[in-house]
Amino acid sequence: MTPETIETLVNLLMLLSGLAIWWMTKHGGLRGRIAERARQAANTYRNDRANSADDEEKAGFGKRVMRCLSRIGDKIPLFEVAYRMKLQKEMLRSGYRSNMAVSILLAVKFGVGFVCAALTVMLGSNLPMIGEYPAARGIAMLMTFIVGMILPEYVVAFMASRRRKAMAGCLPDALDLLVICTNAGNSLGVSIRRVADEMKSICPPLADEFSLTADELKLSGDSLRALNALAERIDLPSIRALISTLTQSMRYGTPITHALRTLSRTERLAHIVSLEEKAAKLAPKMVVPMMLFILPAIVAISAGSAVIQLLAFIAQQSKRTLPTFFAVSRCRSAPYRS
């Protein structure tokens, strides 16, 4: 084995030993062991249900990969229960409601971090100002491991933000449909179900959330809990205003239709104001692209012909004046030669 290979293996072992020491310090107590055993028991029961023979026969390659990642994520002891609950909220807001979503994300986070650390160790000798020092390569390995573990979480947050923006743009239409359904005499659960069916082709994420809320209203009958769960999953100020309006109407016995009509008008006005604001910001944003891409083309088209004619005229004048200049210079230099 070459010295570089030995150094690479030593750095990887240092990374794994550091992770093991960190886990032992975080989960070494009795409370941590009890929580770990409870989590392992719950994961074992869930995996036993998920890995039945019939499901294995019907599942495809993608599902088997997801289950494998879920098992790996359940066995990784680096993440606490509070952090897992936080990731579960982010996954719910991104539209992933599976029981294996958090475990798959944890496995992906650890895998990306480990791959980044391994690449840094293998290619660290070629980095300028770092490859000459083993300690610097070790620090770079730890930094890339941390960055690699953070990147999947940022991707999930970006997906959740884009999903919320799509639902916020279609919410005024959904409120108008909800007002029409309540005016027709339908109950809240039936109205939400009808709105979800109508919004499937317009905004599938919002239709999915409304459909889940309608199912919760039908099964549990607890309207307050179902509506609060909807507000927690979507996490939009407009949705929270809708939920507060509906809960107040149900609590005080006021007509839901009038409150929904007022809220729909307010959301429509806010949507129009946001569109006008985006249109007003468009002109300053277009200045830099116009100066970089459009203005040079306009200048080339408008002044190009004039510049070409000017260059041709200068070339013709130079052809006429050069022989005369050389003749005059010969005549002046002739007496000196004699």
Image (cartoon, helix red, strand yellow):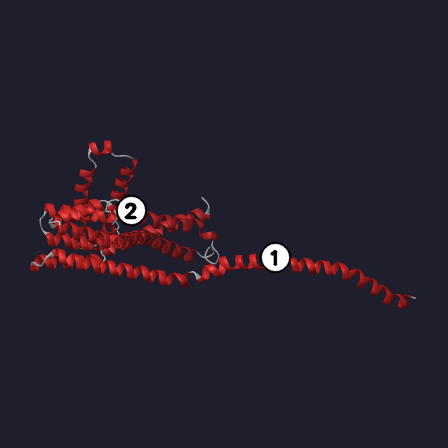
Label 2 secondary element: helix
Secondary structure, mark 1, is helix
Question: Residue visible at 27% across and 38% down?
Answer: 63
The residue labelled by disc 1 is 305
Task: From this view, report whether residue 135 is shown above or below residue 66.
Answer: below
Q: Amino acid at mark 1?
A: Ser
Q: Nearer the viewer, residue 126 or 52?
A: 52
State the quadrant of the N terminus: top left
Side of 328 relative to 262 (left or right)? right
In the image, 171 versus 10, the foreground residue is 171
The residue identified by callout 2 is 107
Which residue corresponds to the image point at 30% horizontal and 53% vertical from the top-left?
A: 162
User: Where's residue 171, x and y in %?
Assistant: 23, 54
Mark 1 or 2, nearer chain start: 2
Vertical arrangement, residue 189 with respect to residue 322, above or below: above
Circle 1/circle 2 CB separation < 8 Å = no
What residue do we see at 26% from left, 48% from top? 203
Tell whether 256 sits left or right of 70: left
The 10 Å Cα crowd at callout 1, few under 14, some 14 to 19, many 20 or more, is few
Residue 198's spot in the image, x, y percent? 21, 45
Q: CA distance from mark 1 to mark 2?
A: 63 Å
